[in-house]
Image: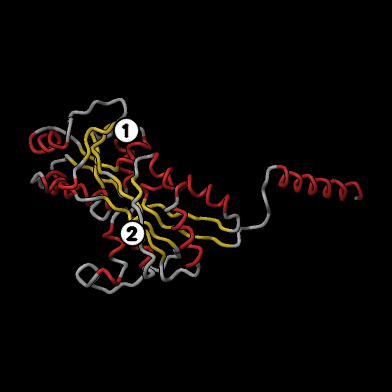
Amino acid sequence: MRNRKKQVLTAAAAGLAGLVLFGASPALADTELIVFAAASLTESLEEIKALYEEENPDVQVIYNFDSSGTLKTQIEEGADCDVFISASPKQMDQLDVRSGEDINPDGLDFVLEESRTDLLENKVVLAVAADDEGEAGSFDELAELLADGDVLLAMGNADVPVGQYTQKILAYYGLDEQQLAADGKITYGSNVKEVTTQVSQGSVDCGVVYSTDAFSAGLTVIDTATEEMCGQVIYPAAVLKTSEKQEEAQAYLSFLRGEVSSQIFEKIGFTPIESEE
């Protein structure tokens, strides 16, 4: 019995030594900061998380990545969230009472006043798999193929910002999305990552995604949409009024605007937007 007790104590001591050796700590961070962010931010924000937590060991950043439309709905339904970063102003506007009745008819008031900021700009691109030259050499050629030829395009759903930008591109060329879908020329993804996967796996001929996602997935960019075709691709960020950690959330947003984070964003193709302050 005495030997068994000694073995248990020895094992416990060895486990504690292992925690010290590998830098782990049994203590949890004092603050868990929940960030809802557009799926296209996954790679860059994961890299930033490691740096932020290193500088702020009392804070653990917890991410929820999905389409901006899905995240907006989750916030409306009461999900715990401290910071929201959308891939389009539309979803942020629908949570911000200051956006006006025409955009926010229900008067939803989730955005903490003066915390909202335009964080990043992205680009919408036409992309193919890395080893594929693609049938369409540009958006112009894609429009011709969709109208008259045999091509399969992947795009985001209508409630996903990348899908909404794609809808604007189709409208720019006078194309009927519903008819194209009925003719089997369009497939859909519930977020930009699903569209990117379809392109990467070669299950479609091409896809409309963000420049940053094409870079992260190693896709070949065929063409870049102009502002005339789909507008600017702006990523707004804000602290939520429902957050009980508004000070910590604002500090995290300030870190995202800093030089270190900006370099990470720029590395995969985002353009940080300078603060007006």
Quadrant where the C terminus sits is bottom left
Point out which mark residue 188 bears: none
Quadrant of the image occupied by residue 56: bottom right
Image x and y of residue 91, in percent: 29, 60
Mark 2 secondary-structure assignment = loop
Image x and y of residue 13, in percent: 80, 48
Q: Are marks 2 and 1 in contact (CB under 8 Å)?
A: no
Q: Residue at coordinates 28% horizontally, 74% vertically from top-left?
A: 107
| Residue 253 appears left or right of 157 | right
Three-letter amino acid code of the residue under disc 1: Leu
Mark 1 secondary-structure assignment = loop
Which residue sits furthest right?
A: 2
The numbered mark, 2 or 1, whose residue comes first in the sequence reads: 1
The residue under label 1 is 219
In the depicted view, which residue is nearer to us: 236 or 75?
236
**Relative to 102, does residue 146 appear above or below in the rendering?**
above
Quadrant of the image occupied by residue 180: top left
Q: Is residue 28 visible?
A: yes
Q: Residues within 10 Å of mark 1 (few under 14, many from 20)?
A: many
Point out which mark residue 276 bears: 2
**Relative to 111, does residue 230 appear above or below in the rendering?**
above
In the depicted view, which residue is nearer to us: 182 or 60?
60
Q: Is residue 43 visible?
A: no
Q: Residue at coordinates 30% horizontally, 40% vertically from top-left?
A: 211
Q: Residue at coordinates 10% horizontally, 32% vertically from top-left?
A: 149
Image x and y of residue 276, in percent: 33, 59
Q: Residue at coordinates 47% horizontally, 67% vertically from top-left?
A: 246
* Foreground label between 2 and 1: 2
